[in-house]
Amino acid sequence: MIRGHLQPVAVVDTAPAAPSGPARRWLARAVACLGIMLAMALASMGPALAHASLVRTDPGDGEVTGTAPARFVLTFNESVTPLVLRVIRPDGTAFDLLRQARQGRAIDVEAPKDLGIGTHVLSWRVVSEDGHPVSGAIVFSIGAPSVNTMRTAGDVGDGPVRFAIWATKLGLFIGMFVGIGGAFYRAWISRPERHGLRVIAGAIILGFVAALFSIGLQGLDALGLPFSGRIHRMAWAAGVDSSQGRTAIVVAAALIAAFISLGTPRVSACRALSLVALLAIGAALTMSGHASTAHPQWLMRSAVFLHSVGIAFWTGALTPLFAQLVAESPDAAMSLRRFSRAILFVLVPLVAAGIVLAVVQVQHASALWTTDYGRVLLIKLGLLAAVAGLAAYNRWRLTPQVEHATPGAARRLARVIAVEMVLVLAVLSVVALWRFTPPPRALAAAASEPAYVHIHGPKAMADLTITPGRAGPVEAVITIAAGDFGPLKAKEVTLILTDPVAGIGPLRRPARRSDDGSWRVEGLVMPIAGHWSVRIVILISDFEQVTLEDTIGIRP
């Protein structure tokens, strides 16, 4: 409880003096460190979509083939790195294929020679460009289906791992925004004093521990290992190699710089270290995550940088400001005045960047209540609205009262800031859930991926692409060539689709020749998802006709 009132003090808010020689050297080092960190962030840039999605497989999931496949091909909507790839035979024995796999957008690997009759499981786990692992399995049968009870990588109980990832994510946020933000506030807004120092230092230590543990947990998640494998060297190596691991390393370095700044007596050095730490967390968060891997890259990474730095500046001020008010520090009024001036310039890029990130990630308003990502965003916005309301009340009502030493004003402002701190912690807890929710943008991109099949015969071959590769209205494009890869002139091309399991078809559609030489079927509707039998009838002349047959998978 606050006893007494803030006594009227002469508030002298002088501008910082021009940097001295040592200060200029510290600032030069800060700029150099920032340049290195930004270079690391830019080095990680590349075309990507958050959360890779499997768009087609060969053989298809649920397919029954007459003969053993020669190769396994998994095609994703972006480049991926395989972590686990194994085939499980009908007798439960497994064969590891990872060392033979060629990575990229399509993982292509030669199938084992000894695949027998029955049902097989191809289990896979990959990591996408944003550092998030994705896993699954496809089931196919040779000759006839059989019973296979072997567990796949996707079946591993990862509840403890997911909870630990969420907890370390929250710890990282507290270290970055409360710890580094608080260190920056002490160095640049208020005089470097001990008010709130223990809480800021504790937040930094918590963030550093969380950063270290997050690397190993990222490896566990990437490899699909249970929580008991947290001390396995392979898990830590996989975590370090991921973009999330590299982000954690940069954040850990920023936390060290902020911690050193707390005990640095020289003001110029303290400011330089805290500035480097603040800018470093902005650069670090552009190296991984959903938003930073969206397009256009320059806009999204800039928005992530501005948004995270703005949050750290705002959130970091709460703890030391609360401590100053509770301790009735004579510098509290001056700190309030300087913070109130600065926050106006921070809020504009902070809000603008947040709007850009939300619009690009959500795309359609309906996704706010139809997707997990959107629902988390709505909860976050609701909490932020409450925080913004309290902040406005503080800025326009209580801050002037504290500056004029109105009796009881400091006590009221401290209480409101305490509530604001609790709400901010709730916001960070909710935002940490985004680690497990792909944004609507990524879901839409995966859904729009085409279905594709290549059919090769002795006299002719064809590439069939159905866009989008899901049930509903689609467009089919057929490209034909001779069996020896030479040109092939055709009078007519007809596409015939049948779903024998659902008893649909045949759907017979003539194709129209386009100016680019391909044949297009427009106005086609795929009524349901599943494995459709494909027949492409190519009329070469009045006396010659070639028929190509295969299957194509259509997603829901």
Image (tube, rainbow, N blue to C red):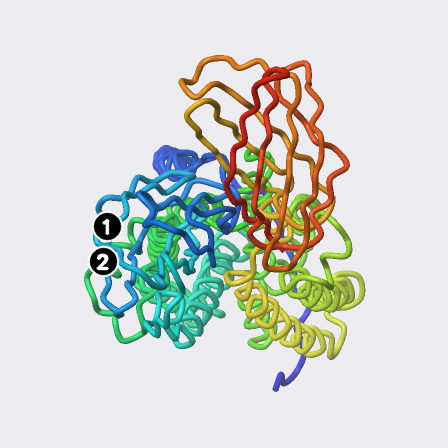
Left or right, 494 with respect to 204, comes to right
Residue in front for this viewpoint, 532 or 134: 532
Query: Dot 2 surroundings within 10 Å: few (below 14), some, or many (20 or more)?
Result: some
The numbered mark at residue 95 is: 2
Question: Looking at the image, how many numbered discs can be counted on the residues?
Answer: 2
Question: Residue 9: which quarter of the image?
Answer: bottom right
As drawn, the residue found furthest toward the left would be 233
Amino acid under disc 1: Pro
- Please tell me whether mark 2 sits on a helix, a strand or a loop: strand
Residue in front for this viewpoint, 58 or 233: 58
Question: Is residue 30 among what the camera can see?
Answer: no
- Please tell me whether mark 1 sits on a helix, a strand or a loop: loop
Q: Are marks 1 and 2 in contact (CB under 8 Å)?
A: yes
Amino acid under disc 2: Phe
Residue located at (57% from left, 38% from top):
302
Left or right, 522 with respect to 269, comes to right
- Which residue matches tag 1? 112
Q: Position of residue 468 (x, y in %)?
A: 64, 41
Question: Is residue 445 among what the camera can see?
Answer: yes
Question: Residue 356: which quarter of the image?
Answer: top right
- Up-down relation of residue 496 to residue 368 (above or below): above
Q: Position of residue 27 (x, y in %)?
A: 40, 37
- Up-down relation of residue 34 to residue 377 (above or below): above
Left or right, 67 with respect to 348, comes to left
Upstream in sequence: badge 1 or badge 2: 2
Front label number (1 vs 2): 1
- Up-down relation of residue 157 to residue 3 (above or below): above
